[in-house]
Image (cartoon, rainbow, N blue to C red):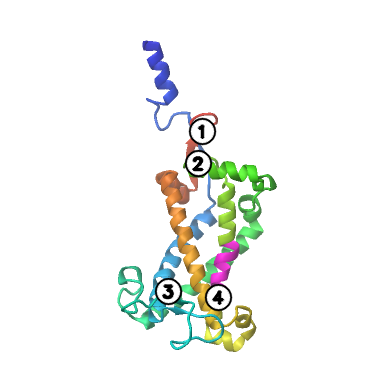
Amino acid sequence: MKQQFVAARAASGVGKSAGSASMRKVHRHSLATRLWHWANVATMAIMLMSGLMIFNAHPRLYWGHYGANPDPAWLDWSGGDGIPFPGWITLPSFYSLADARLWHLAFAWAFAVLVAGYLVWAGLSGHLRRRIAPRLHELAPAHLLREAAAHARLRFAPEAGYNTFQKLTYGAVLLVLLPGMVLTGLGMSPAIDAGYPGLVDLLGGRQSARSLHFIGMALLAAFFAVHIAMVLASGPLGQLRAMVTGWQRIPAEGEGQA
């Protein structure tokens, strides 16, 4: 009985120290990715909160070049008091369209530089090809179904690379959503409308650019919510450590893996 008890403890990992040989370190994120990630967290938080205050000033969305109160809106979120987003989630927390525009436009330039700089680095360094672009076999229906089932059971493989759903999602965010936010933001600018009307026409007009900008913001907010939920479900301390130091400790080959 004693031998069986000792064997059971050994199989379950009870009594092993955190620094035992059953764990190994893998490199998860490059320095450029980590710096860009945290700079983006701060920049996009400020832009989201200030953008919501700007939306509060006129919570109606239109398609085309023109739109005002008498025009039919495809989204009317004015409500009873006309303020759809409360002060605790806006910047500033009190109603001020002028201050919100100052915050938003100041950090919009930082956001554009971060997006352009990271995409250039990711393309030249091969990061997009090596880490983001899915392999052909990963797009097979059987492989996607296996990954979907593992996600539904909250079973995450402790591997160094991104899984297929991460690659597809991060690729869509990096190559479509973030550049789209920059372009639609430019499309709302009166200066761009005057100097480069072709861009505004391409977006369908300034009001269409505003609508697309809001839709992009909603999609990014949904991405952030799912991203945070996945981090919490897969071990927040380890994920946070990896995004700070670049390294993560995972079970050694053949131990503790589903």
Residue visible at 49% across and 63% down in the picture: 220
Give the amino acid type for the residue marked by disc 4 in the picture: Thr
The quarter of the picture where residue 221 lies is: bottom left
Residue at which label 1 appears:
257
The quarter of the picture where residue 126 lies is: bottom right
Residue at which label 3 appears:
51
Tag of residue 156:
2
Secondary structure beneath label 2: loop
Q: Is residue 39 visible?
A: no
Q: Nearer the viewer, residue 21 or 152?
A: 152
Q: Where, quadrant-wise, is the N terminus in this rendering? A: top left
| Residue 179 belongs to the span the image colors magenta | yes
Q: Nearer the viewer, residue 23 or 97?
A: 97
Above or below: residue 169 compared with residue 114: above
User: Crowding at label 4, few (<14), some or many (≥20) Cα neighbours within 10 Å?
Assistant: many
Above or below: residue 117 compared with residue 22: below
Q: Which residues are magenta?
A: 174-185
Residue visible at 56% across and 80% down in the picture: 187
Give the amino acid type for the residue marked by disc 3 in the picture: Gly
Residue visible at 42% across and 17% down in the picture: 7
Sequence order check: which comes first, mark 4 or mark 3? 3
Residue at which label 4 appears:
184
